[in-house]
Amino acid sequence: MARRSRIALVAAGILLVVAGALVKWVAAPALVKVPLDVKSTTVAQGDSRLFVLAQQAVQPVHVVATRTVLGDRSAGTGSVAVYDETLCLVAQGTKTDGSGCASSADPGFIDKTTDRVAFDRKSAMAVVDASKYEAAINGDMSIAHDGLDYTFPIGTGKKTYPLYDTIAGKAFPATYEGAEKIHGLTVYRFEQQIPSTPIKIRGLLPGTYRGATTVWVEPATGVIVKGAQKILQTFTSNAATVFDGTLTFTDPTVAERVHYAKSQLTKIHLIRTWMPLGLAGLGLLLVVAGFVLRRRRAAPAADGPPIEQIQPESSQT
């Protein structure tokens, strides 16, 4: 019975060690993905020069941009995530609703856009067959996404990535420019230059757009914790300014994004490191316990009393 118990301990220990290896090398790569169910709101703001339609003139305006991203869990799959984004720009001081937007009739309203994107949950790249997920910009499904959108890949590398720009409707290279610390979190900084690109101002008037985007990314999770975007839009007809300014994440937004990235990082460490180590450690303990019990059972037999000698029979007289 004791022998069977020792064998069971060793066998269970070996199985746990193997399970730890499988979690590390098989399960973790399959489980660590961009989440399907997200809900985030980021706020960026900055001083800008803006063409005010009512005044027919360019005026200085402090712009507040509120972006809401919601994951459509029902549309996502094991390999594809679908996110809906709404971006609203208003003048500072404008009365807004719960989403940070205002009525288009409000004098402080500047612009509102929507975006629905489908992307790979590992590489974060837009999927080719996005039409079946109803991906669109401002409801226009003919505009194709490519590259990255609202997250970088799991395990972001120190290299160049194509980063999609919704204003231009195409992706441009975002190059790795170094590692930094934000609130104690190590992040990678990527910079993107957008050359002069023809666009439709408010979807109607011919215009030109150029800009620059900088994003700070937590590499293990791909979470963008900070962003800054330089935007210059002009009318094609007379080169008059439509929008000229830089919008940067507010400090509370950066703090919230860092907190979110750290929470996701904890989950990744749990799956990639602590679960495999825990299983392997427990397995090794069971194996050691099995051998210790074997030695303890063997010890009394070795140290027991000597076998009694056979006494010779007494001689008969």
Image (cartoon, grey):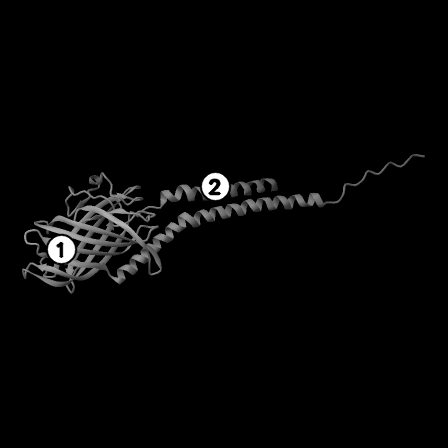
- Residue 272 x, y percent position in the rendering: 40, 47
Locate residue 58: give its quadrant.
bottom left
When the figure is inspected, residue 314 is found, relative to residue 113, above or below; the finding is above
The extreme right residue here reads: 317
- Residue 196 x, y percent position in the rendering: 15, 50
Left or right side of 292 for 159:
left
Residue name at image x 8 percent, y 54 percent: 239
Left or right side of 54 for 85:
right
The residue singled out by tag 2 in the image is 18
- Neighbourhood count class around disc 2 (C-alpha, 10 Å): few under 14, some 14–19, many 20 upward: some
Amino acid type, label 1: Asp
When the figure is inspected, residue 35 is found, relative to residue 230, above or below; the finding is above
Q: CA distance from mark 2 to mark 1?
A: 56 Å
Q: Nearer the viewer, residue 259 or 153?
A: 153
SS of the residue under disc 1: strand
User: For the C terminus, which image quadrant?
Assistant: top right
Sequence-wise, the earlier of marks 2 and 1 is 2
- Residue 68 x, y percent position in the rendering: 22, 54
User: Residue 257: which numbered mark, if any?
Assistant: none
The extreme bottom residue here reads: 93
When the figure is inspected, residue 144 is found, relative to residue 179, above or below; the finding is above
Amino acid type, label 2: Val
Q: Are marks 2 and 1 in contact (CB under 8 Å)?
A: no
Q: Nearer the viewer, residue 199 or 2?
A: 199
Asked if one can make out residue 1 in the rendered structure from this viewpoint, the answer is no
SS of the residue under disc 2: helix
- Neighbourhood count class around disc 1 (C-alpha, 10 Å): few under 14, some 14–19, many 20 upward: some
The residue singled out by tag 1 in the image is 111
